[in-house]
Image (tube, helix red, strand yellow):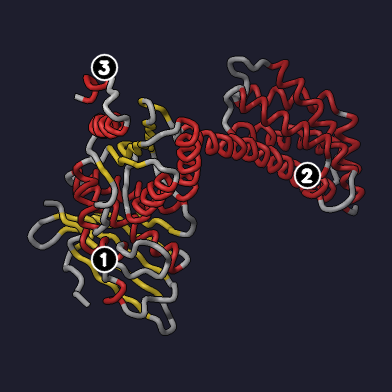
């Protein structure tokens, strides 16, 4: 796995539960609000929100729910960004590399969600376990350009 | 003194002192600021009598206090009525609940008179009173919430139907302006409306405009493709319009292939394209105005 970026959180993180379908919308709104606060360009906002939407839905559908943490982070070179952390205690992903390939789907979707979300973000790390305690954590960051 | 006796004692107090209770309750609410535009002291007084009578009735019932209160039909209806009229007069839920809870302070002095020097009796009576009034406060809050939930349910339905109109733009051309989140439930409504519209207007082209859709992710794209496929089965082609630059970049990077679907940046482009398709199909019977519009 790629190592996580060495960025420091700024301010308090915002935690959004993802337990019912309506929470997908709450998550998108919260991520968009964070992106607007950081004055991301419109296209970057759209990419970030879309990636968040994919990951939140994965969390809801495949893991039966979880939690999104939204943080503003700053790198050593003073570049700022938004870090999204999705954590669940679902069954885990048996083969994360395969799951990232386009067309891979276990839920009847298009199979672009996970790989697409990775392409839409600058940093992307999956930590997953299929042996108890099972669960998946995805940490994804997008920097302000 | 057992609970049964305490409750009957309390009910007697309420029965004997009804007018005094109502007077001081109205007074307490006036002090709390319950009187506002369109809501007079008389209105408050009118509401007070059925509530007090209902309390006495609930106290006469068996079972735990909370259950007795929530099952006393007269009290429930008096409290729901109170909650409703207050909400309509613009009072907040907490102001309404505080008004009901104020009954405690109003009735405590009366209990003190009754109990005299018997401190234990006063304590027991106060506890019983407190339980009854708290339960009544809960009922008020519940009916307030039920009213709100009813409004939300109705609005959700209205939004779902309102926001998915199918409009005829030209002969055999329909447009569906999509606004808001495209979840499965919305897509179902859109699809049904569209398919009926296609049949009704004998449409050849349907334009799905996604200008008002904030996020197009893989599931939204999949829903759009399904809608297009269903329309094709009915002999109508679809054009997806309103693809903003940031959406185009995001869809491309996500890796969604929309190449089998005709897409346009704006509704105007889509309409121009649709008109040319429809008029070509008509075999040269192009009215002049139609050509002018297509340009």
Element at label 3: helix
**Is B79 drawn above or below residue A26 in the view shown?**
above
**Is B76 drawn above or below residue B27 in the view shown?**
below
Q: Is residue B81 left or right of residue A118?
A: right
Element at label 1: helix
Q: According to the image, label 1 marks what residue?
A: A115
Q: Residues within 10 Å of mark 1 (few under 14, many from 20)?
A: many
Q: According to the image, label 3 marks what residue?
A: B289
Which residue sits at x=58%, y=15%? B37
In terms of image quadrants, where is residue A100? Answer: bottom left
- In depth, the one of B254 and A50 nearer the eye is B254
Q: Is label 3 or label 1 in front? A: 3
Give the spatial CA distance, label 1 vs label 2: 54 Å
Read off the chain for label 1.
A
**Is B121 drawn above or below residue A102 in the view shown?**
above
Q: Is label 1 or label 2 in front? A: 1
Report whether mark 3 lies on the same chain as mark 1: no
Q: Residues within 10 Å of mark 3 (few under 14, many from 20)?
A: few
Which residue sits at x=37%, y=67%? A87
**Where does the image place residue A16, in percent across and percent down from the top left?**
39, 56
Which residue sits at x=35%, y=36%? B205
Element at label 2: helix
Q: Farthest residue toward the left?
A: A77
Residue A39 in sight here: no
Q: Are marks 3 and 1 in contact (CB under 8 Å)?
A: no
Which residue sits at x=85%, y=48%? B121
- In depth, the one of B95 and B105 nearer the eye is B95
Q: According to the image, label 2 marks what residue?
A: B70
**Where does the image place residue B21, in percent across and percent down from the top left?**
79, 28
């Amino acid at each position: 796995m790629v190592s996580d970026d060495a960025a420091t959180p700024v301010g308090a993180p915002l935690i959004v539960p993802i337990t019912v379908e309506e929470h997908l919308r709450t998550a998108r709104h919260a991520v968009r609000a964070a992106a607007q606060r950081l004055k991301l360009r419109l296209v970057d906002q759209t990419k970030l929100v879309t990636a968040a939407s994919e990951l939140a839905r994965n969390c809801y559908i495949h893991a039966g729910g979880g939690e999104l943490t939204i943080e503003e982070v700053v790198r050593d070179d003073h570049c700022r960004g938004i870090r999204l952390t999705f954590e669940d205690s679902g069954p885990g992903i048996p083969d994360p590399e395969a799951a990232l390939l386009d067309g891979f789907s276990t839920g009847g979707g298009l199979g672009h969600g996970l790989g697409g979300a990775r392409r839409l973000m600058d940093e992307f790390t999956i930590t997953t376990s299929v042996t108890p305690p099972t669960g998946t954590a995805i940490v994804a960051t997008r920097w302000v350009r | 003194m057992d609970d049964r006796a305490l409750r009957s004692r309390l009910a007697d107090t309420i029965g004997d002192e009804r007018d005094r209770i109502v007077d001081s309750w109205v007074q307490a609410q006036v002090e709390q600021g319950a009187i506002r535009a369109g809501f007079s002291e008389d209105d408050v007084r009118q509401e007070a009598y059925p509530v007090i009578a209902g309390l006495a009735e609930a106290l006469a019932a068996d079972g735990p206090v909370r259950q007795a209160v929530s099952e006393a039909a007269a009290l429930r209806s008096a409290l729901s009525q109170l909650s409703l009229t207050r909400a309509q007069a613009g009072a907040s839920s907490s102001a309404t609940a505080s008004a009901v809870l104020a009954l405690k302070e109003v009735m405590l002095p009366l209990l003190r008179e009754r109990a005299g020097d018997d401190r234990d009796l006063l304590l027991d009576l106060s506890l019983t009173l407190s339980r009854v009034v708290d339960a009544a406060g809960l009922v008020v809050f519940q009916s307030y919430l039920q009213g709100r939930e009813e409004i939300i349910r109705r609005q959700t339905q209205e939004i779902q139907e309102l926001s998915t109109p199918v409009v005829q733009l030209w002969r055999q051309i329909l447009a569906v302006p999509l606004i808001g989140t495209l979840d499965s439930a919305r897509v179902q409504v859109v699809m049904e409306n569209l398919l009926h519209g296609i049949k009704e207007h004998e449409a050849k082209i349907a334009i799905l405009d996604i200008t008002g859709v904030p996020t197009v992710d893989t599931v939204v794209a999949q829903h759009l493709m399904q809608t297009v496929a269903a329309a094709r089965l009915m002999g109508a082609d679809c054009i997806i319009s309103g693809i903003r630059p940031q959406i185009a970049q995001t869809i491309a990077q996500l890796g969604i292939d929309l190449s089998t679907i005709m897409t346009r940046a704006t509704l105007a482009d889509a309409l121009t394209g649709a008109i040319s398709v429809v008029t070509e199909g008509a075999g040269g019977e192009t009215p002049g105005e139609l050509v002018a519009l297509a340009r």
